[in-house]
Amino acid sequence: MGSTGKTQSSPAGGARDRDSEGRARNARPRDGLGRPLPYGSEGVPRQPEGVVRTPRETVREAQRLLDEGKPFHAHEVFEDAWKSGPGEERELWRGLAQLAVGLTHAARGNLTGGARLLRRGAGAAGAWASAAGRPRPHGIDVEGVAAWARELAGEVEGEGRCVDAAARAPRLRGADPGR
């Protein structure tokens, strides 16, 4: 087993991959966009699940992964914040996770799904920030990120082609040099 408690080899006799608690888990290696690779292939390290980070650590780690062209992995970081953070912030983190998944789909070639998730995430994060009266929660430029997502959704639909996830990564803190 790896450090995340997941099995690392192909399931024997068609049995399902299981974690140390017996829950079904897909232990296949994944590429930078989260696509499963054949067993035995060299994949990128997966994000450990259930990590509790401060909001600042969440933003920093997600930005690093987005900059590396790994929006699927960034979504997992946002998902941890969504599941472990205070209830009043869940919509913010859920919206950011949806944005990362939207970028993932746009990079993988699922253009319709990518555009839809980019818009849904922009709406969720933007609505949360407006309702909470916090346009820059934890330094996140929610308005700028939402505008980025809507613009990218329009480009993906209009141009009908995949995007380079690293080249199109959003700036979570805008031009803030203190990321």
Image: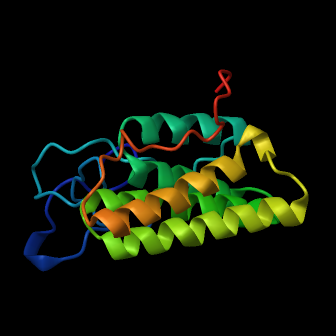
Q: Residue furthest front?
A: 158
Q: Residue at the location (70% across, 36% down)?
A: 56
Percent position of residue 40, x then y: 9, 50
Residue 132 appears in which quarter of the rendering? bottom right
Percent position of residue 168, x then y: 40, 44
Do we see residue 102 in this rendering?
no
Is the residue 3 above or below the residue 159 in the image? above
Is the residue 97 above or below the residue 60 in the image? below
Q: Residue furthest right?
A: 133
Is the residue 10 above or below the residue 179 in the image? below
Percent position of residue 133, x then y: 91, 57
Q: Residue at the location (21% across, 61% down)?
A: 36
Along the viewing direction, whichever of 97 and 154 lies nearer the viewer? 154
The colour style of the image is: rainbow
Give the side of residue 92 with respect to residue 130, left or right: left
Quadrant where the C terminus is found in the figure: top right
Give the side of residue 12 with respect to residue 168, left or right: left
Q: Residue at the location (48% across, 48% down)?
A: 74
Along the viewing direction, whichever of 45 and 143 lies nearer the viewer? 143
Do we see residue 118 in this rendering?
yes
Q: Residue furthest top?
A: 177
Residue 19 appears in which quarter of the rendering? bottom left
Q: Residue at the location (45% across, 57% down)?
A: 152
Percent position of residue 39, x then y: 12, 57
Along the viewing direction, whichever of 17 and 145 lies nearer the viewer? 145
Give the side of residue 126 with respect to residue 86, left or right: left
